[in-house]
Every structure is written in structure tokens, then in C-alpha cells.
Amino acid sequence: MARKFFVGGNWKCNGTTEEVKKIVTTLNEAEVPSEDVVEVVVSPPFVFLNFVKSLLRSDFHVAAQNCWVRKGGAFTGEISAEMLVNLSIPWVIIGHSERRALLKESNEFVGDKVAYALSQGLKVIACIGETLEERESGSTMAVVAAQTKAIADKVTNWDNVVLAYEPVWAIGTGKVATPAQAQDVHRELRKWLSENVSGAIAESTRIIYGGSVNGANCKELAAQPDVDGFLVGGASLKPEFVDIIKSAT
Ligand code: PEP
């Protein structure tokens, strides 16, 4: 079965009520390919999740940017997977490099979070990616394989997982991976899944690219055979996000 193109917008820690309304209005008025062709998911900060969900067109969906590693309780400041399910939030981003780097989320912790979120019925955008230093030392594949393995060790059903390859050196830097660089890693990741999980899962799992994607560079990246869509940060706050959605066709 063909992999449906996926475009996620990670709004990170940005926005006011007014700004959020403006972005949603732009999205609601946009003419984009149908839901059969492209799955669109936007991820506002927690405090705006319900607000965005209530305003957003019904063919687009929302994601949280994180959730706690297990059942909620005495974890001040955290949001549990159960709460997201209770609010009918279908998706969650887990393992973003900003959290891995700034909040010291380890591969194992990310793997546990992915597994717990899935067990509660959430769909997961699981992020992986190497730093510039790791790329320059030739360890890109070893790094992303270890990150993927930590997830694969805990996950049995991949139906609700989208794997987001986001090289850290490309995130928020304006330095996008070339289409060939993205394709190389995506192809190798698919091969890794095939050899270590199963051929069927390698074939069906969407591997999306993130890191300085914009309206100008999305088309060429989207044309790569193993690039199944994007996770977009900065440009998801701008009208050009619509162009990125349109790169699905
Ligand atoms: C991200 O934060 O997931 C991301 C890809 O950011 P940007 O598009 O701004 O590089």
C-alpha cells in the first residue's frame, strides 16, 4: 500500500491567541489536496491545543508536542497521554531534538515514551537525527539507528508511528539537507527497519524529513522516493506552510 504523504507543523513554544487564530484562518482558507492524498497535523503548544482543535478545519488534525512517559500523577508540569486521549488529541510528537538536547531525554526514555503513548491510543511522530559533529565524524547512520532501535525495542505495532528524521544541524538553522542527503538517510532507515523489524513495516512506515523545510525547497525534497512528508518548524507558522502541504502532489 502506498504511504500517504504526511505534513506536520511544529509550532514549538510560539504564539498568542491572536497569532494562533491568524494561522488557523490561513489554514482553514487554504485549498490543498484532499485528506486521501495528504495527512496534515499541526502541533500548537499545550495551552492552545483545544482552542486550535475547535477552530481548525476537520480534515486537519492536532498533535501535542510531548507527553509524560507513563501514567499521570505526581509529575508537576507534565501532561499525560491519558489527558491527551481524554481531550481527543490524536497525535503527539515525541523525542524532538530540542527536548533530547535541552532536557536530556535519552534514547531509552524516548523509546519508553513512544511505547506508552501508543499503548494509550495516541499516534506518534517520533523524532530522530544526528548533530553536525556526528555527521562530520561519519556516524549519522549509527546515531539514527541507535535512536530507532531504542524505539523498536519497545514498540510492537508500528501502524501509528511516523518516523521524523530531523538532522539537528538543519533545525532552525536555514541549512536544509540536500534532497540527496535526506534520501540517503531515509533509504538507510528503511533498510534498517526491514532488517531489524520487518519488510512490511519498512514498506508501510512513513519516514518524514524535518529541518529548515520551506515553500521553496519542499518540492525537490518531496520528490525523493523515501521522503514521505515533512515535519516543519519555523515555516509552519507562516502562510508558506500551505505550499509545503501542496508539495504532496
Ligand atoms: C522542527 O522543529 O521540528 C523543525 C523542523 O524546525 P525548522 O523547520 O524550523 O527547522
Image: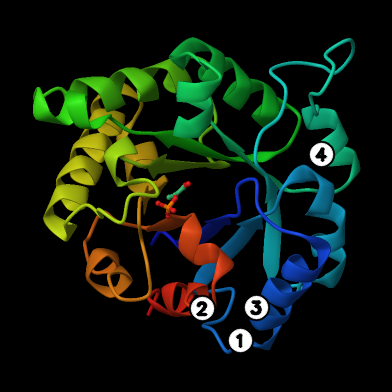
Whichever of labels 2 and 1 marks the residue nearer the N terminus, that label is: 1
The answer to whether residue 56 is above or below residue 231 is below
Q: Residues within 10 Å of mark 3 (few under 14, many from 20)?
A: some
> Mark 1 touching mark 3, by CB under 8 A?
yes
- The residue closer to the viewer here, 28 or 61, is 28
Distance from label 1 to label 3 (Cα)?
5 Å
How far across and down, in percent of the image, does residue 29 sit?
A: 68, 88
Distance from label 4 to label 2 (Cα)?
26 Å
What's the residue type where badge 2 is placed? Val
Q: Which residue is mark 4?
A: 84
> Mark 2 touching mark 1, by CB under 8 A?
yes
Q: Is residue 199 left or right of residue 49?
A: left
Q: Which residue is mark 3?
A: 27
Whichever of labels 4 and 2 marks the residue nearer the N terminus, that label is: 4
Q: Is residue 137 left or right of residue 128?
A: left
Name which quarter of the figure residue 41 lies in: bottom right
Name which quarter of the figure residue 221 lies in: bottom left
Q: Which residue is mark 1?
A: 30
What's the residue type where badge 1 is placed? Ala
How far across and down, in percent of the image, does residue 181 sit?
A: 15, 49
